[in-house]
Image (cartoon, rainbow, N blue to C red):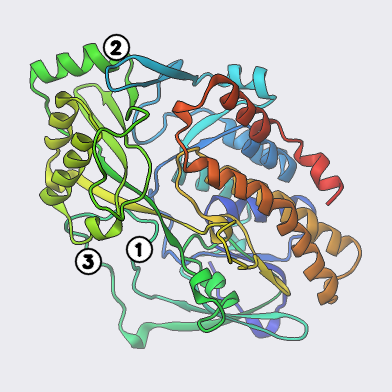
Amino acid sequence: MGALNADAHLYDVVVIGAGPVGLATAVGLRSRGITNIAVLERARSFRQVGQVLDILPNGLRALKYLDPQAHQAILEPTAPAGPPRPASQWFYRDLQGQPIRSVSMDSEDWLEKYGEGRNSLSWFNVQTRLRELLPQEDIWVNHRCINLKAEADYVEIDCVSNTTEERNPYAHWATPAPEVAETASPATLENKQLRAKLVVAADGINSTVRQWLHPEGSGFVQATPVYSGFVAFLCMDVGELPEALWAELSEQYFQGQPIVTVCQDAEPHEAALSLDAPTGRSRIMMFRRGNSCGYIVHAPISLEVLQGKSGAASIDLAVQQLEQAGFSDCIKQFVGLAPPEQFTQRPYYMHPVDLEGNTAAWSSGKVVLVGDAAHGMPPFLAQGVNQGFEDAAVVVAGIERIRQQGLWGDEGAIASQFQQYEQLRRPVMARVQKLTLTEKARWSDEQSEDYNQWVFCRDLVRDLEVF
């Protein structure tokens, strides 16, 4: 990849962040003939990182609007990374092992019900499939945005290369002994500048651009994520289970399935670990592939209780939470068998959309936020990337209007388009975030189907026509 020459070139659009949402935005722009674009990615290279993403009907519908090739690419089947997926049904069970509800994993069932199917892919696989739809020269790795400056006719973007690759404290899994990050001496750092008529920031929940939009002293708390109240504990491979333990787990919970989610009863059995702990119920997803077993525990735990815990102490905390929530001895034993070096944890953060007093706008002038940078949230409903694709569709539609009407230099018209985007998307995200923090497994059949019809069957194209 060559060197950027900011003095010689003014881009129509620069997308910051080459994750799935940023790449989908770029693909949508190119499909509409807006090819004078660049996508900046802070990572030094594309690597197999990230968890499994469930691409659901609303996300697929947005991708089809952006570019039918993207829609088709994401639908291509593959063996997903991470936990195995059930062949046909994913069961949610109560603490006694009785079924609460089940979800079909058959894409054809989803297509019949909601007009689009579904697919489960690793984050890296989604990124790769979208990246392959763009010219290589459009994507600039090793370019970390550190600042923006709004000028009369363009936005100046300051980038730095060859920086230390730091963990994102709001999105990465914490391990007991994190690897030492690569370092670069100050002499090797490279500073670059780009200029763009418009900037679309898809730079994640720890967004540099969001912090630029809302600097310290003018509502800085709105720029940084807040703790959602939930933490995830993960062990991908517990190791060989005692025969008696596996027999009990298999008979009571797995019941012939490779994966199952067990949910806390409707009423907590004990008080929370801390008086200031968040409200909510714990659940565990357990999976088995061959002789390997693993789990993900989602639990409402305060950051104060979590702070400083790692390795064996973190495992003990997970077991304690399950005990206070009334989980069976076999599940607690299973969780406690995790090797400390295989155990990780992650507090989930979010950018609340309808937090009282939160007036954090998603745009300013020629700069707009999409995806987690605008409304990051926990993954419990698998709507993070899908809602990000919807953002991309609406923003691309607005930019297309700007191009068609020759309004690249009209800051008022640009601001109006981005404000309309937020007006369309914010009410949707407020509802999605609120529902994300409830327990869908405990919804009634009517509540569940109402949600499915609303989120999966909304007519995005119709909404864009009135946008």
Q: CA distance from mark 2 to mark 1?
A: 38 Å
Let me know if residue 199 appears in the view: no
340 with respect to 22 (left or right): left
| Residue drawn at (72%, 73%) of the image | 366
Secondary-structure class at tag 3:
loop
Labels 2 & 1 near each other (Cβ < 8 A): no
Q: CA distance from mark 1 to mark 3?
A: 15 Å
Is tag 1's residue or tag 3's residue first in the polypeptide sequence?
A: 1
Quadrant of residue 245 in the image? top left
User: On the image, numbered disc 1 is attached to which residue?
Assistant: 169
User: Is 381 placed above or below 256 here?
Assistant: below
User: On the image, numbered disc 3 is attached to which residue?
Assistant: 180
Residue 366 image label: none
Q: In front: mark 3 or mark 2?
A: 2
User: On the image, numbered disc 2 is attached to which residue?
Assistant: 255
Let me know if residue 328 appears in the view: yes
